[in-house]
Amino acid sequence: MSIEAKTTTVLITGASTGIGATYADRFAKRGHNLVLVARNGARLEEVAARLRKETGVTIDIIVADLTKSADVAKVETRLRDDKNIGILLNNAGAAVHGGFETATVDAQENLITLNITALTRLSAAVIPRYLAQGQGAIVNIASVVALAPELPLGMYGATKAYVLHYSQALHAELGARGLYVQAVLPAATRTEIWERSGRDVNEMTGVMEVGELVDAALVGFDRGEVITIPPLPDAAQWETFNSARQAMLPNLGQEHAAARYQA
């Protein structure tokens, strides 16, 4: 069974709206059964009911707040025990209004819990089973701001940098053993995340529609890309950036400080 086989169930977090709900629509229309996870049970059921009617696939819902350890544990259990789940899509995430100076430390901690800790725990729950089966996919929704620490987005950009690095590290360590990892780096996308973080998306420019974002990300998924950057016109720019990073690696493990630091 390939990871794209129709018998593969897809578990999607943050599936009640936006990117997660759109992924649910696309995977259901490909014939996949779904497990949808989000805090808002009423919205989840609306998405599930529509897709059951339109596609006939089996859809389960798990109402869970992934900033709460007990709720994360519910999803971890499903990932460990359900051998049909062959694709984990870590989409749940949030932003916080303001940068490091203005955002409260509690808000920053909550962002880390959702964007980093929950994503890591859910991935860790499913990886042993994927390795034992010799196949499985994890799709992590990162952001182009992972590449742009200069932007005044505070902790949000830092959490997405973790998601990018984590995805690359997973691929480097376990990709040869059947684990496919894709990190998707959207730019600004028309979802509710902006309203929740105190910004009006209608006053922003360069905002991609969510359907276009997900469709592009799925092209990258079908191609087996590790890094998918839907808004980037020239793939060579990413390749140049990544090659420059890799070129430094042989020079980073040195017994002595570089001559430029020696008096």
Image (cartoon, helix red, strand yellow):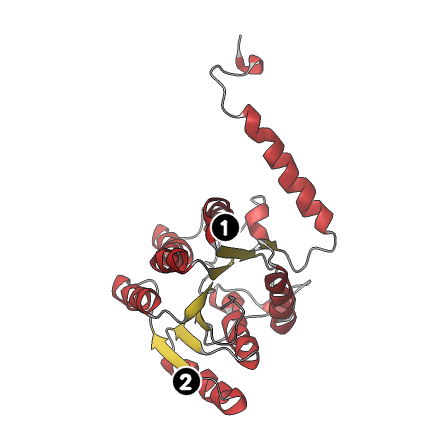
What residue would you read off at disc 1? 175
Q: Secondary structure at mark 1?
A: helix
Q: On the picture, is 51 further left or further right than 112?
A: right
Residue 142 seen in the current view: no
Badge 2 vs badge 1, beta-carbon distance below 8 Å:
no
Q: Quadrant of residue 114?
A: bottom left
Crowding at mark 1 (Cα within 10 Å: few <14, some 14-19, many 20+):
some
Q: Of residues 31 and 72, which is closer to you in this image? A: 31
- Judged from this view, the residue extending furthest toward the bottom is 53
Q: On the picture, is 114 further left or further right than 99?
A: left
Give, as a three-letter code, the residue at label 1.
Gly
| CA gap, disc 2 and disc 1 | 35 Å
Question: Which of label 2 and label 1 is nearer to you?
Answer: 1
Residue 30 drawn at (x, y percent): 57, 78
Q: Secondary structure at mark 2?
A: helix
Residue 109 drawn at (x, y percent): 35, 52
Tell me which numbered mark, 2 or 1, is placed earlier along the sequence: 2
Give, as a three-letter code, the residue at label 2.
Glu
Location of residue 108 with respect to 16 vertically, above or below: above
Q: On the picture, is 37 further left or further right than 143?
A: left
